[in-house]
């Protein structure tokens, strides 16, 4: 892919992310996307320091050989599953009837959206756990501290 195309796609993803933040479910989707991106970044950095990379193996080959890492080949998408056209073509060949085809198409179109939402909920839960721990350990936590500052006129 050309650098201009990558910049355009990054700008588009940034705009979509900003628009999604206006609603709570969209904010969870936006929260899930960087979690998925960081997962890919961690695996890629592990690969870079592994003997496989030193031997000259490519990251694409590494993830293709391991099914659990197949979705990490490229950056995560907002909605479409990774390699959506390939996924739809192969899924439509084995689909039976109209409902099977519709299921394949909807799965390809909304797979990453569902993954982002699921991981966004998990991230929200993690943030909530730390927030509750802050309440327990520091009296009133962040909210209490802000209320104290407001009462002091700061």
Image (tube, rainbow, N blue to C red):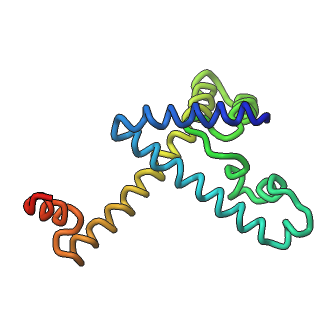
Q: Examine the rendered structure and indicate whether residue 109 appears above or below residue 121.
A: above
Which quarter of the image is occupied by the N terminus?
top right
- The quarter holding residue 6 reads top right
Q: Position of residue 82 (x, y in %)?
A: 67, 41
Q: Would residue 18 be found to the left or right of residue 111 on screen?
A: left
- Tally the numbered discs: 0
Residue 133 seen from this side: yes
Q: Is residue 134 above or below residue 57?
A: below
Q: Residue furthest bottom?
A: 137
Q: Residue at x 85, y 57 (%)?
A: 58
Give the residue drawn at x 73%, y 56%. Answer: 67
**Quadrant (top left, top right, bottom left, bottom right) of the C terminus:** bottom left
Residue nearest the observer in this picture, 49 or 126: 49
Q: Position of residue 120 (x, y in %)?
A: 44, 50
Q: Quadrant of residue 104?
A: top right
Q: Residue furthest front?
A: 154
Residue reaching furthest right?
Answer: 55
- 6 sits to left or right of 148: right
Q: Nearer the viewer, residue 84 or 23?
A: 23
Q: In the displayed structure, would residue 33 be above or below residue 26?
A: below
Which residue sits at x=73%, y=50%? 73
Q: Is residue 46 left or right of residue 35?
A: right
Name the residue located 26 percent from the left edge and 68 percent from the top edge: 132
Q: Is residue 91 visible?
A: no
- Percent across and percent down for residue 50 are 79, 72
Left of 32 or right of it: where is 81? right
């Amino acid at each position: 892919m050309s650098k201009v195309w990558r910049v355009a796609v990054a700008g588009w993803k940034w705009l979509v992310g900003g628009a999604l933040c206006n609603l709570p479910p969209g904010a969870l989707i936006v929260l899930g996307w960087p979690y998925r991106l960081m997962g890919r970044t961690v695996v890629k950095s592990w690969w870079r320091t592994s003997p496989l990379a030193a031997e000259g193996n490519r990251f694409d080959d590494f993830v293709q050989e391991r099914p659990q890492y197949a979705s990490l080949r490229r950056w995560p998408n907002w909605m479409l599953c990774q390699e959506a056209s390939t996924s739809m073509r192969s899924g439509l060949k084995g689909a039976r009837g109209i409902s099977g085809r519709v299921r394949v198409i909807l799965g390809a179109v909304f797979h990453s959206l569902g993954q982002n939402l699921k991981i966004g909920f998990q991230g929200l839960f993690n943030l909530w756990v730390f927030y509750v721990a802050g309440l327990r350990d520091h009296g009133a936590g962040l909210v209490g501290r802000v209320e104290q500052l407001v009462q002091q006129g700061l």
